[in-house]
Each structure stands twice: as C-alpha cells, then as structure tokens.
Amino acid sequence: MRKILNFGSLNADYVYTVNHMVRGGETTASLGMTIFPGGKGLNQSIALARAGLPVYHAGLIGEDGDFLLDTLRADGVDTQFVGKIPGRGGHTIIQVDKNAQNAILLFGGSNRAITPAYADEVLSHFSSGDLLLLQNEISALPHILDKAHDIGMEVWLNPSPMDEGVFACDLTKVSGFFLNEIEGAELTGSGDPEIILTRMAEKFPNAAVVLTLGEHGAWYAKDGMRVFCPAEKAEAVDTTAAGDTFTGYFLRGMLDGLAPEKALQLAAKAAAITVSRPGAAPSIPNYEELNASRV
Ligand code: RIB
C-alpha cells in the first residue's frame, strides 16, 4: 500500500483576539489569548488523519514542543519521524479580528533546523509511488523535493508562506499544487484566477493545480480540464487552518478515486467547519462530522 508522508512544520500558535489588527507604532490590548497546536505541517497531518488517512509526519520540535507531538499522536498520526532538538520550537503570534480574519507572525525555530542529512534518513523509509506532502515552513525544502522526486514519490506542494524558499525549488518536480490567490499570483504574476490557472498549466503542464479562493470557491485544473466548486456557507469565527483542512480532505477524496469536483466539495465542506471554530488543529473536523453537519 502506498504510504503518505507529510514533511512539515509544527508550531505553537499564540492566538490573540483583537478588535483590529495592531498597526505599526501602535500598542493595543488584546481581548484574549489561547495557545493552540498548529503549523501548516501539523495542521495538514491532522486533517489527513481526521479525514481517515494513515499518515506519517516528519519534522522537528524544540524543547517546548511535546504538546505538538501529543496532538499528532492523539489523532493517530505516525510520529516515528518527528525529532526533538535543544532550543525553541516553531511558534506564531496570530491576531484574529472580529471579521475572523487573521494576521500571522511566524518564528521558525526547530522547523528551520531540518538538514538534508535528516531528510535523507526520513526519505530512505519511503519508495516510488508513495505520496509526499510539503509546505514552505521548513528548511531544506529544495533538497527534500529533489530527493523525493529521485525516489519516484508523488509530491504535492502547498507553497505557503510564499517566499524565496519556494523559488529555490525545482517546481517542475511537483505533481500537484495547493495554492491560494496570493501564492498563485507570486507564481504567475497575475491575481486573476483564470490567468493563474492558464499560466500554471503553461509552466507546469504535468501538474495538477488546486486553487482556493476562500468564500469565492475553489478550482481544480489538470491536463486541460478545469472544475469549479463554490464555497460552503459558514459562520466564520477564525479562518486559521481552513486551507490546511482543504488540503487534507482534497487528498482524501483524490486517493479515494473521487472525481475532482467531488473531492473539491468534500474539502470545501470540511473547511467550512474549520472556519466556524477557533484555533488551528483543534478546529479541523473528523470525517464523521462532515456527514452530521449541515454546512
Ligand atoms: O495555516 C495555518 C498555520 O499557519 C497556523 O497554524 C500557523 O502555525 C501558521 O503556520
């Protein structure tokens, strides 16, 4: 059976509720603070696991990160490839305003201590046909992509947060992209979804593209085929991890052999539940909840 590996970040999210996002030079009191397990990597592993897929997570926590490991284990994620190193782990400071929008300040910590040698050791346990999911919150990303491609793994990349680390990668080795409009614009030079899809197909003709547009729905494109799915209606309180949820549930649908339209619908339904609850990983629904939910 093909294995699923998610090589990604693990963060402690310090989430502050605010009336408005703090501006440069301003000091403002928050309305409350909660610490949640998060990180795009951890969130996507939790989403895969709650979608019912067996998943291995690889990454590094710091001395303060035991609760992140506990979070993964509680959902049945295989953590044999998660290491612990001295010093601080990854963390974020997240402001969530009254409109459920967020602003995230990221400190990489242990996520930036991943070396090519560490990655090689992890990847030596995987083989051709296995699936690798990546985001851009860890070090050694170009090496991991190259190595996984050499092995023959199918690599799906969520190039978030978008920065120069993504452009250091040979993106022709990616089998599938999970993009939002910002990432799509960075990769193609246009913020227009239509143009993003056209230019992605020109640049990466063999790759699938999932383009999420928040409340404006999502697209899937591959081999000249395009499928659109509207967003599910939701009472949003915190949009953190909505994209991560979408990723995990889309992969569940795809690996189940669903038509892309159905996989998008499944993912949209799960993401709508996530935005209706606070926090990152804790807000991600499990598969049974989707059936019970009316969103
Ligand atoms: O995608 C949401 C995640 O991004 C948060 O959990 C935070 O840790 C940041 O990495």
Image (cartoon, grey):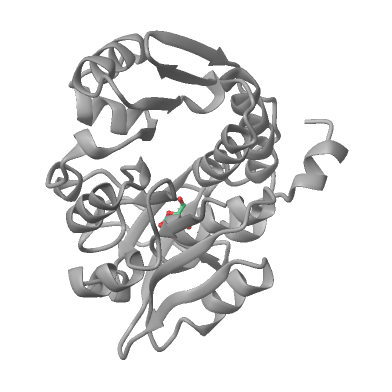
Q: Depth check: 225 or 211 in front?
A: 225
For this view, does 86 lie left or right of residue 172? right
Tell me what residue is drawn at x 57 percent, y 61 percent: 31
Vertical relation: 201 (above or below) 263 = above
Q: Depth check: 70 or 207 in front?
A: 207
- Number of disc labels: 0
Q: Quadrant of the C terminus?
A: top right
Residue 19 placement (x, y as % from top left): 52, 49
Residue 48 placement (x, y as % from top left): 59, 51
Residue 152 placement (x, y as % from top left): 31, 46
For this view, does 54 lie left or right of residue 185? right
For this view, does 155 lie left or right of residue 274? left
Tell me what residue is drawn at x 35 percent, y 9 percent: 194
Which quadrant of the picture is home to ligand 1? bottom left
Tell me what residue is drawn at x 53 percent, y 13 percent: 228
Can you name the residue that lies furthest to the right here? 292
Q: Depth check: 182 or 270 in front?
A: 270
Residue 88 placement (x, y as % from top left): 33, 83
Tell me what residue is drawn at x 33 percent, y 58 percent: 105
Image-quadrant location for residue 274: top right
Vertical relation: 230 (above or below) 157 = above
Image-quadrant location for residue 109: bottom left
Residue 99 shows up from this direction: no
For this view, does 253 lie left or right of residue 94? right
Residue 95 shows up from this direction: yes
